[in-house]
Image: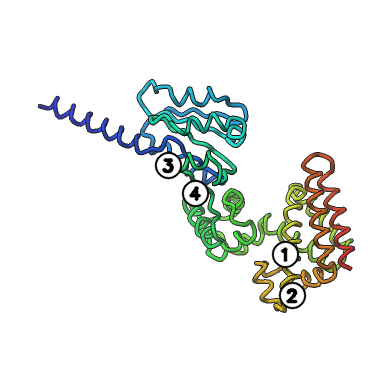
Amino acid sequence: MVKHQFRGVIRTRREATVRSMRDVPPVIALVGLDAFGEEEALDEALAAAGAEPAVTSLDGPVATPSDVFDELRSVSMFGGRRVVVLREADAFVTKHRETLEGYLASPATESTLILRLQTLPKNTKVYKLVAKVGQVTAAKAMKPHEAARWLGQRAKDVHGLRLAADAARLLVDTVGVDRAGLDNELAKLALQCDGSIGVDDVAGGVAFRREQQMWTMTDAITRGDAGRAVTVWRQLLATDPSSEFRAVAWLAGWLDKAHLAESLQRQGRGPGEIKRALKMPPYADVDGVLRSASAVGKSRLSKATDALAELDYRVKTGASDAARGCESFIARLASAAR
């Protein structure tokens, strides 16, 4: 009797495992997710695949179709679901698109292919096939209040600290909603704080000081003070060498704000309304941005944007030094704002 009951339990568990495995889609595309989003999605997929899935990770740029599809069509030695995770899969999709489409039209049902992609346009056949037989998990940017709430929970769960709500909002205003960047700054603050993290702790952090210096630099540009703008730029490089890689994105964002400020000002909007529309932090000088936008003018702002795009291209291709190129650009832009 006991033996029969035991066999019944084993059979029930086996059937439950088979059912759970069949609930896992044969292909999952993770598109544009940050490190945290990918980790969460992978954990969910592997958990759904059963207790002991056979996982193989491959690099998209070098993997061949036989590497991927032979692995997916083979039977797992221990009976678990076979999972192939294809990292940097964009290159594989581009190079082996037709072969991938052929597999997706009739995928192995007892295996799962996980594609980690930066992009997957909805109008492509690959997207339509994945959506038909599997699932697409695409990035969805968190809103600032969601990021602040996530930070509070992260501080509690990982660091055992209480993060004040206003401190969380200030961190998001300073760093943005990227969870990797936020987690990095939170980890630094956790090393300096004991028990709780407040606004003053955030304001004394590296990211906040860098943000303020960036605004000081662009404020100097708006006043046409090239000497001051270049001095602050050099101070930024001395205290945070990574600034040379952040500067182009920062200046591009600042130029976008100047464009929008100029447009809103022509529509008769007031400084307070413009500051809110530009989502500028409390310490930023909206009047300076407006003065600069008026002084430089719409045409030269457009030319400055083109020049910055050219600088970005030259830096990325190794044709120009980032630090010197940014300094020259800052000096020219400030001179144009006089």
* Quadrant, the C terminus: bottom right
Say which mark, if any, is on residue 265.
2
The residue nearer to you, when weighing 37 against 116, is 116
Q: Nearer the viewer, mark 2 or mark 3?
A: 2
Query: In whole angstroms, how far apart are the C-alphas of marks 1 and 3?
Result: 40 Å
Of the image marks 1 and 3, the number of the one nearer the N terminus:
3
Query: In whole angstroms, how far apart are the C-alphas of marks 2 and 1?
Result: 12 Å
Secondary structure state at the residue bearing disc 1: helix
In percent of width and height, residue 195 lies at 52, 57
Up-down relation of residue 87 to residue 294 (above or below): above
The residue tagged 3 is 44
The residue nearer to you, when weighing 43 against 69, is 69
What amino acid is found at the position of numbered circle 3 in the picture? Glu
In percent of width and height, residue 261 lies at 73, 70
Query: In whole angstroms, how far apart are the C-alphas of marks 1 and 4?
Result: 36 Å
- Pointer 2 with pointer 1, Cβ within 8 A: no
- Pointer 1 with pointer 3, Cβ within 8 A: no
Say which mark, if any, is on residue 158.
4
**Residue appearing at x 85%, y 70% in the figure:** 295
**Residue appearing at x 49%, y 36% in the figure:** 114
* Quadrant, the N terminus: top left
What amino acid is found at the position of numbered circle 2 in the picture? Gln
Of the image marks 4 and 2, the number of the one nearer the N terminus:
4
Say which mark, if any, is on residue 323.
none
In percent of width and height, residue 231 lies at 85, 58
Secondary structure state at the residue bearing disc 3: helix
What amino acid is found at the position of numbered circle 4 in the picture? Val
Secondary structure state at the residue bearing disc 2: helix
Q: Nearer the viewer, mark 1 or mark 4?
A: 1
The residue tagged 1 is 257
**Residue appearing at x 51%, y 59% in the figure:** 146
